Image (cartoon, rainbow, N blue to C red):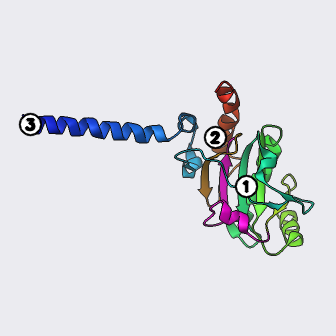
Amino acid sequence: MALMKRVAMMAVLMMTVLASVALAVPALAADLPRDGEMRKLSLSAERKPVAQPEFSDPADQPTTLEAQRGKVVLLNLWATWCIPCRAEMPALDRLQAQRGGKDFEVVAVAQDRGGRAKVEKFLAETKVVHLKPYLDASMKSGRAWGAVGLPTTILIDRQGREVGRLVGEAVWDGPDALKLIDALIAEKTKTAGK
């Protein structure tokens, strides 16, 4: 009988632990659709504010992600020498053309010591016209954001918190990505009362 009580208590304890782990993922994140290729996106266990390192805007003035506060941001870290980045950049450009505006922005920050001219040449070669040529020649921003490879893409909510990240290339203007991004944009109404 004592063994049965112990087994029952262990079962209750395990269920409590599992329930607390499930609660660690924000309810809204759990509701986000991650179909097809977007299953590669690793959701954050807890939405925490992203780092705010400086990088250069198109006029070579310092800026941070704080300039995008209130928008859903798809932060993409890339480099001119990165082959997967070359393949991915046109999809990011099309995504910015389709969704960019008051609610959403693709912020593609080149992690490249080659300088502004090299970045702008790369964007022209890949026919990218909708993305702003952000640059961090020091590459300190990539380290601050915890990038372990390029491309790294971090999805950020309107409050400046990381929702999830994907290392490697993806088709960011495909139906699975658009469904995910649109759901995150729609959180505006869900979180307005909280």
Rendered location of residue 1, percent (x, y): 6, 34
Q: Residue at x 67, y 62 (%)?
A: 144
- Residue 180: which numbered mark, if any? 2
Mark 1–mark 3 contact, CB under 8 Å?
no
Considering the numbered disc 2 on the image, is that residue within a helix, a strand or a loop? helix
Q: Which residue is mark 3?
A: 2
Q: Residue at x 55, y 34 (%)?
A: 31
Relative to 38, 139 lies left or right: right
Rendered location of residue 100, percent (x, y): 81, 43
Lower position in the chain sequence, tag 3 or tag 2: 3
- Residue 134: which numbered mark, if any? none
Rendered location of residue 20, percent (x, y): 41, 39
Q: Which is nearer the eye, 148 or 6? A: 6
Magenta-drawn segment? 137-157
Q: Which residue is mark 1?
A: 52
Q: Is residue 149 above or below residue 154?
A: below
Other-residue count near label 1 (Cα within 10 Å), few / some / many at <14 / 14–19 / ≥20? some
Other-residue count near label 2 (Cα within 10 Å), few / some / many at <14 / 14–19 / ≥20? some
Lower position in the chain sequence, tag 1 or tag 3: 3
Amino acid type assigned to the residue bearing label 1 in the image: Gln
Q: Which is nearer the eye, 112 or 21? A: 21
Considering the numbered disc 3 on the image, is that residue within a helix, a strand or a loop? helix
Residue 55 is inside the magenta segment = no
Q: Residue at x 89, y 71 (%)?
A: 117
Lower position in the chain sequence, tag 2 or tag 1: 1
In this rendering, the count of numbered labels is 3
